[in-house]
């Protein structure tokens, strides 16, 4: 079983956002179970902008990657990681350097398409 982390984020803390956060988590857990991933950590952040690259959850995620504790990360969409393209590119480089599989569950957004295309170009 590959060890995986789940990352969920919402920019606000209103009830609708909290429900979406719970849905992100449930979807990621269902994917992990269906595809035989062992979830070793779930990082959830509510009330944090995707433009804030110093979020505590992101720092924890980077730490787990650097410690080589995980082999996969499951998220609903790349926008949950960051809405800043430069920051997203930096995170992507961490994943590539540590050979971490990035699993995006949702349909592609502009950020996830950028991430997908960048990963493909760096894979070869």
Image (tube, helix red, strand yellow):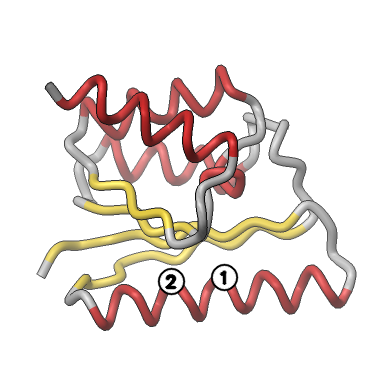
Q: Is residue 45 above or below residue 79?
A: below
Total number of numbered discs in the rendering = 2
Q: Position of residue 53 (x, y in %)?
A: 63, 30
Give the residue at x 33% y 23%.
93
Residue 39 rendering spot, x and y as whole percentages: 30, 70
Position of 92 with respect to 43 (left or right) is left
Query: Among all residues in the image, which is located at the extreme top?
Result: 86
Q: Relative to residue 120, is residue 9 depicted above or below?
A: below
* Residue extending farthest right: 14
Q: Quadrant of residue 67?
A: top left
* Residue at position x 40%, y 77% in the image: 29
Q: Secondary structure at mark 2?
A: helix
Task: Using the image, tell me which numbered label, if any, was put on residue 24.
Answer: 1
Mark 1 surroundings: few (<14), some (14-19) or many (≥20) residues within 10 A: many
Residue 54 location in percent, x, y? 64, 31
Observer-nearest of 14 and 122 = 122
The tag on residue 92 is: none
Quadrant occupied by the C terminus = top left
Q: Residue 15 is drawn in which quadrant? A: bottom right
Q: Are marks 1 and 2 in contact (CB under 8 Å)?
A: yes
The residue beneath circle 2 is 28
11 to the left or right of 70:
right
Residue 58 percent location from the top left of the image = 53, 41
Q: In percent of the image, x 75 and y 47: which residue is there?
A: 48
Tell me the quarter of the picture where residue 105 sits. Answer: bottom left
Question: 82 or 117: nearer the eye?
Answer: 117
Give the CA separation, mark 1 to mark 2: 6 Å
Please report the residue visible at 56 percent of the width from the left and 48 percent of the height from the top. 57
């Amino acid at each position: 079983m590959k060890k995986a982390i789940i990352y969920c984020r919402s920019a606000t803390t209103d009830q609708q956002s909290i429900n979406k956060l719970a849905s992100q988590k449930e979807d990621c857990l269902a994917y992990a179970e269906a595809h035989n991933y062992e979830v070793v950590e779930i990082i959830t952040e509510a009330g944090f902008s995707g433009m804030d690259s110093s979020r505590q959850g992101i720092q924890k995620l980077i730490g787990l990657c650097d410690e080589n504790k995980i082999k996969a990360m499951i998220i609903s969409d790349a926008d949950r990681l960051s809405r800043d393209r430069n920051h997203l590119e930096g995170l992507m480089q961490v994943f590539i350097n540590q050979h971490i599989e990035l699993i995006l569950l949702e349909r592609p957004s502009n950020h996830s398409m950028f991430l997908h295309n960048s990963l493909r170009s760096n894979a070869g």
